[in-house]
Image (cartoon, rainbow, N blue to C red):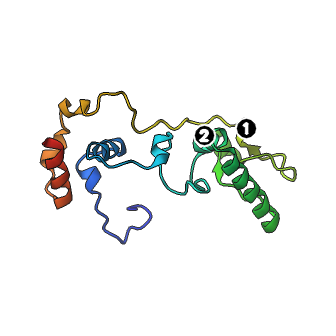
Amino acid sequence: MTLNHSHTKPIYPLLMFAYTKKDCINMVQELGIEVPRTYKLGFLNNNCFNTGCVQGGIGYWQKMKRDFPEKFDAMAEMEHKLTALKGKPVTMLKDQSNKAKKSGNQLVFLKPHNDYPDIKDLSVMKGIEPKPLFECNGFCGVNDLDERKETEGEINYQLDIFDEINDRLQS
């Protein structure tokens, strides 16, 4: 947000409290709020699950292919249709390796495209498997005894909601 929209003055309250995404998931669970299904399935985001996230990386789409092949196939078909309409490759994925960046050939299709055999597809890529943000180990609240982040007390920007959440977590 700060880099892409430098004219704005965004506030990052979760970062200011040194909370990670995993910390937030744990807080939500500890308050008895049901987390979205996608987190339970091991995905790192809850966005666009109906179709699959066009901003998901290689590991994300490998997981989609494995766990939800019908969604994967639909998006691969969409890539091919858009490529045909545009007359040049339309892909969601990029090979982020230094070798690909230097060669200028970063595009990666979800599935091989007959008209573009020189463009890689997901089957030849090595992805980073998304790691679940939480796990059920049968010991709910075991993190209550963990030392809190030292930056929590140093923050001079407070929001009532964070105070309320902290109060609930402490009780």
Give the image location of residue 118, x and y in percent: 82, 46
Give the image location of residue 61, x and y in percent: 62, 45
Q: Nearer the viewer, mark 1 or mark 2?
A: 2
Asked whether the viewer can see residue 8, the reply is yes
Q: Label 2 amino acid?
A: Lys
Q: Name the image quarter holding residue 146.
A: top left
Q: Is residue 143 above or below residue 82?
A: above
Quadrant containing the C terminus is top left
Local secondary structure at mark 2:
helix
Picture residue at 51% right of the left edge, 38% below the top: 130
Local secondary structure at mark 1:
helix
Q: Label 1 amino acid?
A: Ser
Mark 1 or mark 2, which has the lower sequence index?
Answer: 2
Decide which of 33, 59 is in the foreground and name it: 33
Relative to 81, is 18 on the left or the right?
left
Q: Which residue is mark 1?
A: 123
Q: Name the image quarter holding residue 121.
A: top right
Q: Residue furthest right?
A: 114
Asked whether the viewer can see residue 159, the reply is no
Q: Which residue is mark 2?
A: 63
Quadrant containing the N terminus is bottom left
